[in-house]
Amino acid sequence: MAAIFGSWESMREIRTMDNALDHFRVSVQVGSPGSDLRLLAALPRSALITGCGNAVTDQGGLTAMQATQVGLVWRLARRAIAAQSGVAEEQFVDVDPWSETLESDRGDTAQHEPVQRTGGGVKERVLKMSSLIDQQDESELLPPNPSDVDRWYQNYVVTMGAQPDEAEEPTASQLAALHKKVFIENRARYCDFSVWTPFERRMSRVQKCRVYTPLGNGSYLQKDLPGPSTHAAWKASWNVFKAACIMLKICSLASMEAYSRQSAS
């Protein structure tokens, strides 16, 4: 690493973004941390990867060489801040953002194979699609990988600029169910709002709406059907669905806003 980044002692001299860029003689824009190297060093690996994937220059997206340069500057910033903070070189963990070591970085279409458990004979906890996304779907799925959940939340932050409101935030289980339906099973972007609700863990009981059907003799047949009981309840479930779509990148924000306006009219 010394051949690329220099000696550990020399890291104490790299204190600004200009120092880091000059070290590699690159001029690529790596974000907007100003001259504070700490902001770049604190950027999570997933955020760096997402940012590079969404970055657009006058010539289009980042080239492989430009992305590599961004990764090198980020690694140098982390090394410099660690050295200046008194961390010993042997204690520092260097992370290559472009290494092919995390399955979660292979894209949303990657299907995770169930982990084989040995001993004990206890079945690993599974989730039910019927209680999360569609009452007619009796299939099961495994809980999502935490690294996938982190990546999905980072997608939302990149698009919206902040974390979702608590009342609109889908649970990890809801995200995993929608991801399975759309990316693994290649089915329509659909959620049953009688089970897809805000605060999934606290509102697990199926919602009911009451329907009155005229019988022709002046009386009505009363029947309870699955679904939100009011438009406000439908809107609450819709907001959770919209946030999940942004996290999983399965619908554009413009198309969802257009659908929401049409449904409200």
Image (cartoon, grey):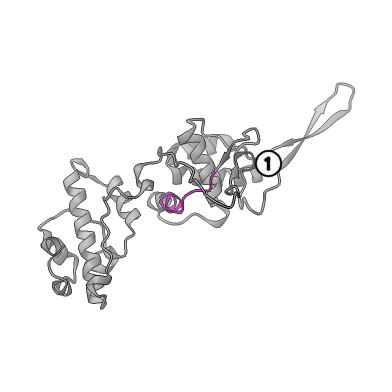
Residue extending furthest toward the front: 119
Three-letter amino acid code of the residue under disc 1: Pro
Relative vertical location of residue 202 with respect to residue 91 in this rendering, above or below: above
* Quarter of the image where one finds residue 26: bottom left
Q: Residues within 10 Å of mark 1 (few under 14, many from 20)?
A: many
Q: Residue 265 or 16: which is nearer the viewer?
A: 16
Query: Measured along the vertical axis of the image, is residue 123 above or below residue 72?
Result: above
Q: Position of residue 74 (x, y in %)?
A: 23, 60
Q: Quadrant of the C terminus?
A: top right
Evaluate whether residue 254 shows in this view.
Answer: yes
* Residue closest to the eye, 57 or 114: 114
Please provide the residue range marked out in magenta. 142-153
Q: Quadrant of the N terminus?
A: bottom left
Pick out the residue farthest to the top: 216
Secondary structure under tag 1 reads: loop
- Relative to residue 231, is residue 238 drawn left or right? left
Q: Residue at x 16, y 70 (%)?
A: 14
Q: Which residue is outermost to the bottom?
A: 86
Q: Position of residue 139 (x, y in %)?
A: 59, 36
Residue 91, quarter of picture: bottom left
Q: In the figure, 59 relative to 161: above or below?
A: above
In terms of depth relative to the viewer, which is nearer, 146 or 248? 146
Q: Position of residue 244 (x, y in %)?
A: 50, 45
Residue 24 image point, x, y percent: 12, 59
Q: Is residue 121 left or right of residue 216?
A: left
Residue picked out by circle 1: 228
